[in-house]
Image (tube, rainbow, N blue to C red):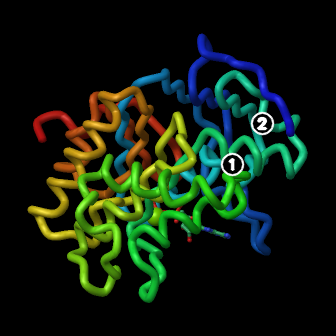
Amino acid sequence: MTEFPDASESPVIEFRQVGLTYPGPPPFEAFRPSDLTVRKGEFITVVGPSGSGKTTFLNIAGLLDTPTRGTFLLDGIDTSMLKDTERTTLRGRRIGFVFQAFHLLPHRSARENVELAMVYSGTSRRERPGRAREALVRVGLGHRTDALPTRMSGGERQRVAIARALVGRPSLLLCDEPTGNLDTGNAEAVLQLLENLNSSGITVVLITHDLAVAARGRRTVSIKDGALSEGDQVGGC
Ligand code: ADP
Ligand code: MG
């Protein structure tokens, strides 16, 4: 297995003039050259309107897309130097993703949905049920492990999705509009859960178009027309 250096002193995310232009045609600069440093243990929110480049940013930070400009260091590792298989391994070991849509299999139980995330992670078949249960307990669903997503509330489904993101024991959680499909009460429960996970040491980056959600970050970065700028538009929320 690939060994990566333990870069515990390095920022988790470091963008140095990172940009991404989709090739098109016509070419489109969806993420304009931007600097950003996210340190271990931070909870940052990235806020901007629809189409401003939030998901593009998250895809770059999550190693799902490759910048066409600049340097992106993840835990001190220069990601431009990585082969595809190394990017995949690094992503699997360090990053958990939470999306607006929960992407759960409707006819599999909560526990099975979480277990499926371990199929390609090298976790032995024997270990998977225990690990899945542990992750579900961590999100407050220890009593719902056998429930089907179709019998769960939106908030519970998102918590299953968060358990699935946690099961690989990531150090960084990237959340793309995680409360976008939830009513106020469920959104609050999910935000509190993310805050608790952050308190336990996981670095959280949450992107949202909602200023009230953005204000929950301990630091806020704005994104507009594909460019990041440190939080100058959220004051007063
Ligand atoms: P947000 O998440 O803030 O709504 P996105 O990052 O999804 O914004 O999109 C930013 C811009 O990039 C949009 O104008 C979108 O149409 C464009 N875009 C996204 N993906 C692609 C792609 N694969 N090719 C070309 N343009 C894209
Ligand atoms: Mg988006």
Measured Cα–Cα span from mark 2 to mark 1: 8 Å
Q: In this rendered view, identify the residue nearer to me: 6 or 115.
A: 115
Q: Any atom of ligand 1 within 8 Å of the CB at mark 2?
A: no
The reply to whether callout 2 and callout 1 are in contact (CB within 8 Å) is yes
Q: Is residue 58 left or right of residue 211?
A: right
Q: Above or below — where is 96 with respect to 198?
A: below
Q: Residue at x 41, y 51 (%)?
A: 135
- Mark 1 secondary-structure assignment: loop
Find disc 1 in the rendering and name its residue.
Answer: 63
Q: Residue at x 70, y 22 (%)?
A: 76
Please provide percent x and percent y for residue 155.
23, 67
Quadrant including the C terminus: top left
Quadrant including the N terminus: top right
Q: How many marks?
A: 2
Please provide percent x and percent y for residue 141.
26, 59
Please provide percent x and percent y for residue 196.
26, 37
Categorize mark 2 by other alpha carbons within 10 Å: few (<14), some (14-19), many (20+): some
Which residue is situated farthest in the front direction here?
Answer: 126
Find disc 2 in the rendering and name its residue.
Answer: 79
Residue type at mark 2: give it: Thr
Q: Above or below — where is 27 with respect to 212?
A: below
Q: Which mark is residue 33?
A: none
